[in-house]
Image (cartoon, rainbow, N blue to C red):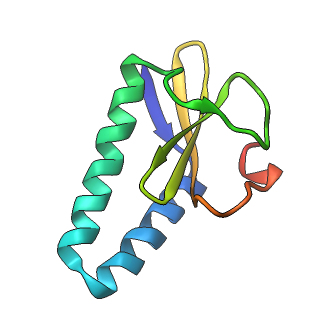
Amino acid sequence: MKISWSPLAVERMAEVKNYILKDNPMAALKWAQEVFDRIENIQEFPFMGRIVPEANRKEIRELLFKNYRIIYRVGTDHISILTIRHGKQLLPSEDIE
């Protein structure tokens, strides 16, 4: 199954990585690689993530990773990474539209 990233997801990934980079460059690289590894897993198991509570739609899922939520949409032959948010942040509806 093909995976694509929304511009918002790319932006959020960069923001988090750059934030971690300020204090610990190695940790930032490790965090980013682990995010990519998690996302690779959903290629084979797209419904492994839980349904996002704010959306309550079967196709909108999230993987919880450390303090972050990797939010994605499952299509028939495509997965879209929608955004990455801190676990304590609520998801605005415009992030999943």
Rendered residue at 52%/22% (across/down): 78
Q: Quadrant of the N terminus?
A: top left
Instruction: Tell me the quarter of the picture where residue 39 sits.
Output: top left
Instruction: Give x and y (percent) for residue 13.
Output: 45, 61
Q: Is residue 66 above or below residue 78?
A: below
Q: Quadrant of the C terminus?
A: top right
Q: Nearer the viewer, residue 8 or 43?
A: 43
Instruction: Give x and y (percent) for residue 29.
Output: 23, 65
Q: Is residue 77 above or below residue 16?
A: above
Rendered residue at 41%/79% (across/down): 19
Instruction: Tell me the quarter of the picture where residue 55 sits.
Output: top right
Q: Is residue 56 left or right of residue 16?
A: right
Number of numbered discs visible in the structure rendering: 0
Instruction: Give x and y (percent) for residue 10.
Output: 48, 57
Rendered residue at 53%/30% (across/down): 49
Q: Is residue 80 above or below residue 29?
A: above
Q: Is residue 28 left or right of residue 79?
A: left
Q: Is residue 16 left or right of residue 84?
A: left
Instruction: Give x and y (percent) for residue 3.
Output: 44, 31
Q: Nearer the viewer, residue 64 or 59?
A: 64
Residue lying farthest to the left in this orientation: 26
Residue lying farthest to the bottom in this orientation: 22
Q: Is residue 52 left or right of residue 3?
A: right
Rendered residue at 52%/28% (across/down): 79
Q: Nearer the viewer, residue 62 or 76?
A: 62
